[in-house]
Image (cartoon, coloured by chain):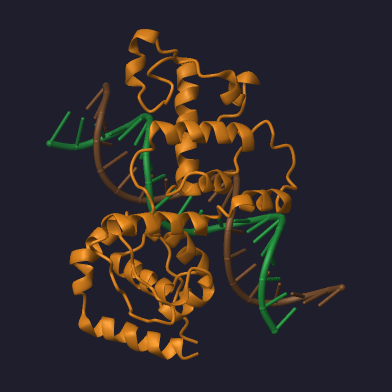
Chain colours: A orange, B green, C brown
Amino acid sequence: MAQEEIRKGPWTEQEDFKLVCFVGLFGDRRWDFIAKVSGLNRTGKSCRLRWVNYLHPGLKRGKMTPQEEKLVVELHAKWGNRWSRIARKLPGRTDNEIKNYWRTYMRKKAQERKHPIPPSSSSSSSSNCYSSTSNNPPADLLPFQATGEVSYYDTGGPNVSTPTRKKSEEKEDHEKGDSMDDIWKDITASEETNDITQSYNCFSDESYNFTCPQMASPAWELYSDSLWKMDEEEGEMLLSMSNHYSSW
DNA sequence: AAATGCGGCAACCGCGGTTCC
DNA sequence: CGGAACCGCGGTTGCCGCATT
């Protein structure tokens, strides 16, 4: 077979566009299927990751707010490195983003411990949500301090004693139906009521009823002018493919 | 102006859990 | 019920841009 190689590395705008459209058509579940029919030559995993971390509508981008930072610290103290779980409590933030934030946060903390910053200069350590008032956050929010030396990035909070978590706590997460999907729905719903002048109707396929809502991602800003002017041929191709596959 | 270091972020990998047949 | 396929999570890596020397 002339099996093309699986692509890796950074995504191109065209790939993003294709992925968004196919996710619109088939939903954000069947990643292997989407990977195949889209012709992206990516793995399903890769597609999912790109969607979740970058293309999903409702993603917030940019710096974490102090409230979010505080929440991350609190939830990490509670749940440890359960990033996806923490992310569910921060609408618009991804587990990857929070994970990366935490790494940075820990690095800063480690440096501060090595070279304590005098209180007078605390105003500059702005990324720390406590910095405006104190460099000594409540101990119960900083498990890594309470236990003395902890490995650099920490691994798991104090209450995360068991690797066999799963089911019970996942259910717990759904107590109020605040799964990621529900959160996204809330976000997109609120955005629609606000000011969604650019509701990109990727395909008016009533079977799936997909509209590309306003995306926070830079990719969407590009789509709004450049990509949406892409080859008509390609658009038609996608349409025909969508017709083809939607008849399955 | 060039070299180097560092931080932030996107993406990949491996593993375990879940779903489907 | 068991196995295969798929999905999701957490850990890790590599790249890129900015700051510093």
Q: Residue at x 43, y 82 (%)?
A: A207
In the displayed structure, would residue A237 be above or below residue A6?
below
Left or right of C4 on screen, residue A14 = left
Residue A196, quarter of the rendered image: bottom left
Left or right of A76 on screen, residue A245 = left
Q: Residue at x 52, y 64 (%)?
A: A45
Q: Residue at x 48, y 78 (%)?
A: A36
Residue A215 visible in rendering: no
* Name of the residue lying farthest toward the front: A193
For the residue pair A89 and A197, the one nearer the viewer reads as A197
Q: Residue at x 70, y 51 (%)?
A: A166
Left or right of A129 on screen, residue A142 = right
Left or right of A11 on screen, residue A4 = right
Residue B3 location (% of width, % of height): 26, 35
Residue C4 location (% of width, % of height): 70, 77
Residue A20, quarter of the rendered image: bottom left
Residue A197 location (% of width, % of height): 23, 62
